[in-house]
Image: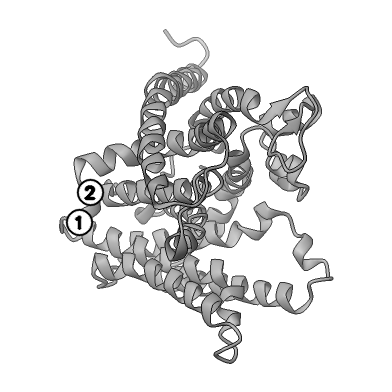
Amino acid sequence: MSLPSRNVLAEPTQRLDALTGLRWWAAFLVFFYHMLVFAPVPGLLAQVFSYGYFGVTFFFVLSGFVLTWSARPAVSNSTFYWRRFARIWPSHMVALILAIPVFYTFAAIPEGSFLKPFDLGILALSVVLLQAWWSNPMILFSGNPAAWTLTCEAFFYALHPWISRVLVPMAKRGALLLAAGVVLYAFVYRAGVALAPDSWLPLVPLPVQRLPEFVLGMALAWAMRNGWRPRIHPFVGVGAMAVAILAILLSSRLNGVVPLIGYVGTFANELFTVGCAIAIVALASASLNGRRVFFDTRLQVKLGEWSFAFYLIHATVIYTALRIFGLQPPSWTNLIWYVVLLAVCIVAAWALHAFVERPVERRMRRWKDRRDATRSVPVGAA
């Protein structure tokens, strides 16, 4: 990215494997959430699994953090954009091709079915990662329904170099103030949606709605690059996410019994966003201080490296099972399905990562590097 020259930006940063490991667990949460459409489990566990979509919130905060943590002044905007394109689009296209026969049909669609009529125009929006700019579910969840988040990521990537121009001149305190301001804005926006549901506020497109999560991650990373090291135990940090889910769960069960507690659920995503921020800085601080963290084991880091492929493929695997075996009645024995389909998803994620994501990204990055190197050679040079 073309950023102002700063010593902080030029300094090398340490690899944070614990965050990679934690990313796997976020993908695992999303898997639980989508499994409910095929193999629901009884009672309280089903309600806990129903909050698995918060894994996406973690992805957005972590994305802003990691991109800013690893930013370098010598990387041009064009190189940054190309690298992000190489990172997500090839795997997205393969996952999309695999998803189409699962989610689309030319035949008559039974009432209540998840199937969609084949529409090339709508699918084209998914190809170019524009589907989440529409709230219509037929468009928002078109193609591979899990890929709506990539529209948000593409939007975040587009803005990252320009937000960085504002962020980089800030010192640690300024970055922390920005983080606090972003969180405050998110709560105020959610309150506005709750108080004025018929206004324009709920109509704000998802990529714009979710931008504060990404900017929060950016601000926290920059504060840490400027020396901020909060003393938060890693399990306290991760526990903050669990506490957020517990508070949201209790609010739904006690709504109408305890005055005003229902408002906790109104701010569910914002509360979990704060939990994500605490978890990320706690694990990052521990790693930077040389402390071993539960999430930085070799297995978890490897699964974290596969997590993007896992996320892209998991819904297709689950809905394939739904088409073949039908909706399962709620039962504890459905946990067997969770184990079986989790194993299938992990194998599929490994294949997508090993044969598409990693090799294609490397080739695309090398092509760009060679092209940039050729352009930098002066005319007439030997």
Check the image and report above or below for 256 versus 223.
below
Q: Say which residue appears at 70% left-offset and 28% top-offset.
A: 104
Q: Say which residue appears at 57% left-offset and 36% top-offset.
A: 326
268 or 91: nearer the viewer: 268
Q: Residues within 10 Å of mark 1 (few under 14, many from 20)?
A: some
Residue 224: percent from the left, percent from the top?
Answer: 34, 62
Q: Does dot 2 land on a helix, a strand or a loop? A: helix
Q: Quadrant of residue 341?
A: top left
Residue 241: percent from the left, percent from the top?
Answer: 40, 66
Q: Which residue is mark 2?
A: 296
Q: Say which residue appears at 48% left-offset and 16% top-offset.
A: 374
Q: Which residue is mark 1?
A: 293
Q: CA distance from mark 2 to mark 1?
A: 6 Å
Q: Is residue 326 left or right of residue 247?
A: right
Check the image and report above or below for 15 versus 253.
above
Q: Is residue 9 left or right of residue 325?
A: left
Check the image and report above or below for 341 versus 228.
above
Quarter of the rendering occupied by the C terminus? top left
Question: Which numbered marker is on residue 362?
Answer: none
Mark 2 vs 1: CB contact within 8 A: yes
Q: Quadrant of residue 166?
A: bottom right
The amino acid beneath tag 1 is: Val
Q: Say which residue appears at 45% left-offset and 49% top-offset.
A: 32
Q: Does dot 1 land on a helix, a strand or a loop? A: loop
Q: Can the viewer see residue 380 in this picture?
A: yes
Q: Quadrant of residue 288?
A: bottom left
Residue 156: percent from the left, percent from the top?
Answer: 59, 48
The amino acid beneath tag 2 is: Asp
